[in-house]
Image: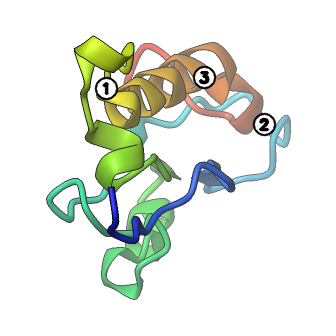
């Protein structure tokens, strides 16, 4: 392979935006998880196009995530032992984290 591959497996993270500080009250807010688009090649959970402020003001916990893109996220070479779809596995793990931990941010794990 003589081509340059852009992408990184560094810096996978979640952003959590909440209407109130954790444990400030007993209110459990609905949760919206945002998975950015970009054709599995580019994109970011921090794009100014997806500002969470209006949802947070309405009492919604907003979670956005990064995931591996391009060949690092979606290349599949079974003959080389590369199963592929790591970007989808990143998304699944992020959703699992939300289900297990969003209560610490006053989010309702039963209303995602």
> Which tag, 2 or 3, sits closer to the chain's start?
2
Task: Tell which tag, 2 or 3, sits nearer the viewer.
Answer: 3
- Residue 33 visible from this viewpoint: no
Q: Which mark is residue 84?
A: 1
Element assignment for label 3 = helix
Foreground residue, 1 or 59? 1
> Do residues under tags 2 and 3 come within 8 Å of each other at their CB atoms?
no
As measured in the structure, the alpha-carbon distance from the residue carrying label 1 to the one carrying label 3 is 21 Å
Return the x and y of residue 4 as percentages of the image width and height: 40, 71
Task: Tell which tag, 1 or 3, sits nearer the viewer.
Answer: 1
Q: Which mark is residue 97?
A: 3
Element assignment for label 2 = loop
Return the x and y of residue 52 as percentages of the image width and height: 44, 69
Where the C terminus falls, by quadrant?
top left
Foreground residue, 90 or 70? 70
Question: Is disc 1 surrounded by few (<14), some (14 to 19) or many (20+) residues within 10 Å?
Answer: some
> Which tag, 1 or 3, sits closer to the chain's start?
1
């Amino acid at each position: 392979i003589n081509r340059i591959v852009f992408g990184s497996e560094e810096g996978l993270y979640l952003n959590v935006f909440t209407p109130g500080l954790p444990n400030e009250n007993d209110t459990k807010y609905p949760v919206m998880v945002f998975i950015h688009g970009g054709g599995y090649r580019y994109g970011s959970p921090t794009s100014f196009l997806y500002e969470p402020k209006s949802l947070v003001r309405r009492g919604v916990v907003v979670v956005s995530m990064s995931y591996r893109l391009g060949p690092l996220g979606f290349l599949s070479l079974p003959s080389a032992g590369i199963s592929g779809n790591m970007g989808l596995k990143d998304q699944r793990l992020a959703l699992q984290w939300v289900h297990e931990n969003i209560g610490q941010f006053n989010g309702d794990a039963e209303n995602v």
